[in-house]
Each structure stands twice: as C-alpha cells, then as structure tokens.
Image (cartoon, rainbow, N blue to C red):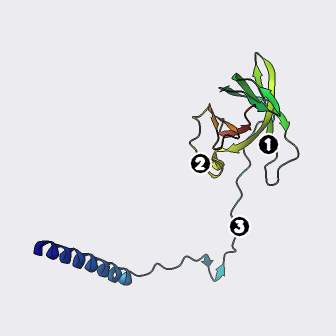
Amino acid sequence: MMKQLVLVGVLVGTLGAGAAWEQTAAAQTPAKPAKTDQVAGHTAPKTQPDTAPAPTLSTGEMQLGSVRFAKAVKADGKPLPAGTYQVRLTAQTATPDAKGETPSSERWVEFLKGGKVAGREVVSIIPQSEISQVQKDAPPPRNGSKVEMLKGGDYYRVWINRGGNHYLIHLPPAA
C-alpha cells in the first residue's frame, strides 16, 4: 500500500512539473513577428480569395463510360430498368442555370443501351480541384465510375471520374 502511494505521489509530481515546465518554456519563446504586406511605407490592399477557375469542359458530346444498375432507377422521371448502360455527355446545358454555377457545368447525359437512348438526366460537372469541397467519399479511379445508394435510400449516385472532371448524377430508385 505504501509503495502505491509513493508511486502515485511521484507520478502526480512529475505531471505537475511537466506542466509547469511547458508554461515556462512557452513564456520564454519569443513571439513571431506579425506578417505585414508593407513595402516602403505602403500597405498592400486586401484582396478577396480568387474564385476557382472554370472547369475545362468540352462543349460537344463525349462518352463518359459505362455504369451498371443492380436495380431499376428513374431518369428524368421515367423508369430505367436494371442493367448496364453507356453514359454520353450531351452538348445540351440544363436550364434554368443554377445560381453560382459555371455555365455548362450542369448538362444532360444520356444512358444508352444497344446504341439507343434509354433515358437521360442532368449531370453536375465538378473539376478535380473542387471535388473535395463537394464530396467527402473516395472518388472512383481515374476513368472509372461507381454507382451507390446514398444514405437514407432516396437516391443512387452515379459518379464518373474522367478527363480531370467528376460527373455526378443523382437518380431516384424506381418504385
């Protein structure tokens, strides 16, 4: 019992001494001088952070790859049966334009089966430099895609990573 009390006393004393030493060391460390943007008596004007550059987008049609739906979904309000589809980006922009969006970053994609259009939906195009601000999940590999049910089961997210841009399509399950 006596040994335990001595060990506890040593431990408490050591922790207390360490905290005191840390405070003393912090007090003795000189503060870093504040950064200034002054040159020859002038202060540089404060500027707003730059907005991200517009994504590099083709304005025509482009094949994005293929996706597989394990269950039926709805594209543009119409049923799209389960299966594998080729996804093609069209030149048609979605209207009305969303506030704050880069023109042509909201476009239509077509889902093709056997060379024929089986359905279409709006896609949001996000440049690689901005994807971490939009999505927290791991993206599909370059030139790859993934289809996953979102939390709550309200939508499937189709995520295509191609040509330095990410293409996000949200489709509700078919009833």
- Circle 2 sits on which residue? 136
Residue at the (44%, 81%) spot, across then down:
31
Which of the marked residues, 3 or 2, is nearer the chain's N terminus? 3
Q: Is residue 16 above or below residue 160?
A: below
The residues tagged by marks 3 and 2 sit, at their Cα atoms, a distance apart of 26 Å
Q: Position of residue 84 (x, y in %)?
A: 68, 22
Query: Along the line of sight, which residue is nearer the eye, 82 or 58?
Result: 82
User: Of helix, strand and loop, which one carries label 2?
Assistant: loop
Query: Along the line of sight, which residue is nearer the eye, 170 or 115?
Result: 170
Q: Inspect the image, locate mark 3, and give the three-letter code of the amino acid beneath it.
A: Gln
Residues under numbered marks 3 and 2 in contact, where contact means CB atoms less than 8 Å apart: no
Residues under numbered marks 2 and 1 in contact, where contact means CB atoms less than 8 Å apart: no
- Circle 3 sits on which residue? 48
Which of the marked residues, 2 or 1, is nearer the chain's N terminus? 1
| Quadrant where the N terminus is found in the figure | bottom left
The residues tagged by marks 2 and 1 sit, at their Cα atoms, a distance apart of 20 Å
| Quadrant where the C terminus is found in the figure | top right
Q: Position of residue 40 (x, y in %)?
A: 62, 81
Q: Is residue 17 above or below residue 146?
A: below
Query: Along the line of sight, which residue is nearer the eye, 130 or 153?
Result: 153
User: Of helix, strand and loop, which one carries label 3?
Assistant: loop
Residues under numbered marks 1 and 3 in contact, where contact means CB atoms less than 8 Å apart: no
Q: Position of residue 160 (x, y in %)?
A: 66, 35
- Circle 1 sits on which residue? 106
Which of the marked residues, 1 or 3, is nearer the chain's N terminus? 3
User: Of helix, strand and loop, which one carries label 1?
Assistant: strand
Q: Is residue 46 above or below residue 137?
A: below
Residue at the farthest right position: 96
Q: Inspect the image, locate mark 2, and give the three-letter code of the amino acid beneath it.
A: Lys
The mark lying in front, picked from 1 and 3, is 1
